[in-house]
């Protein structure tokens, strides 16, 4: 990989995919900065800039405790449909009735 021509996020993606496990954000970003071999005037500014880019890139997943991994390592979240669960439809009916009663009470005031 030609690090000089690659974006910081591409380098971070490459590092994480080769490592195969999450990394502490500062370790990941300092590794990116080393591989890019780009002159840095302020290390804290460079870290903030790369961190922002990683945070905005959907290929990366924040795992908590300042650890970052790749989104592809996590199974996609599955959402339940309300039709598959009988309780959710009855609870939505109760919620609508409660709303109607609240609205009636407000309108009578």
Image (cartoon, grey):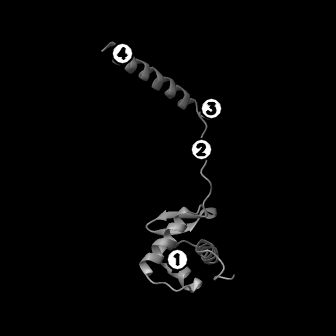
- How far separated are the C-alphas under marks 2 and 1? 32 Å
Answer above or below: position of 76 versus 105.
Answer: below
The residue at 61%/37% (across/down) is: 81
Numbered circle sitting on residue 18: none
State which mark lies toward you, 3 or 4: 4
State which mark lies toward you, 4 or 1: 4
Residue identifier under label 1: 28
Question: Label 3: few (<14), some or many (≥20) within 10 Å?
Answer: few
State which mark lies toward you, 2 or 1: 1
Q: Position of residue 100 (x, y in %)?
A: 43, 19
Sooner in the amino-acid sequence: mark 2 or mark 1 = 1
- How far separated are the C-alphas under marks 3 and 4? 33 Å
Q: Indicate left or right for 18 with 31 as reference.
A: right
Q: Indicate left or right for 1 with 82 as reference.
A: right
Secondary structure, mark 1, is: helix
CB-based contact (under 8 Å), mark 3 and mark 1: no
Q: Position of residue 95 (x, y in %)?
A: 46, 26
The residue at 60%/40% (across/down) is: 80
Sooner in the amino-acid sequence: mark 3 or mark 4 = 3
Residue identifier under label 4: 107
Q: Position of residue 8 (x, y in %)?
A: 58, 75
Secondary structure, mark 3, is: helix
- How far separated are the C-alphas under marks 3 and 2? 12 Å
Q: Position of residue 9 (x, y in %)?
A: 59, 71
Answer above or below: position of 92 versus 106.
Answer: below
CB-based contact (under 8 Å), mark 2 and mark 4: no
The residue at 38%/15% (across/down) is: 104
Numbered circle sitting on residue 79: 2
- How far separated are the C-alphas under marks 3 and 1? 43 Å
Numbered circle sitting on residue 83: 3
State which mark lies toward you, 2 or 4: 4
């Amino acid at each position: 990989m030609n690090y000089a021509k690659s974006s910081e996020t591409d380098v971070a993606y490459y590092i994480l995919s080769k490592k195969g496990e999450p990394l502490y954000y500062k370790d990941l970003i300092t590794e990116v900065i080393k591989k890019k071999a780009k002159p840095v005037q302020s290390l804290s500014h460079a870290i903030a800039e790369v961190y922002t880019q990683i945070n905005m890139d959907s290929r990366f997943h924040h795992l908590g405790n300042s650890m970052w991994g790749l989104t592809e390592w996590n199974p996609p979240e599955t959402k339940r449909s309300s039709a598959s669960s009988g309780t959710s439809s009855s609870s939505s009916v109760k919620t609508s009735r409660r709303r109607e009663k609240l609205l009636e009470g407000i309108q009578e005031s």
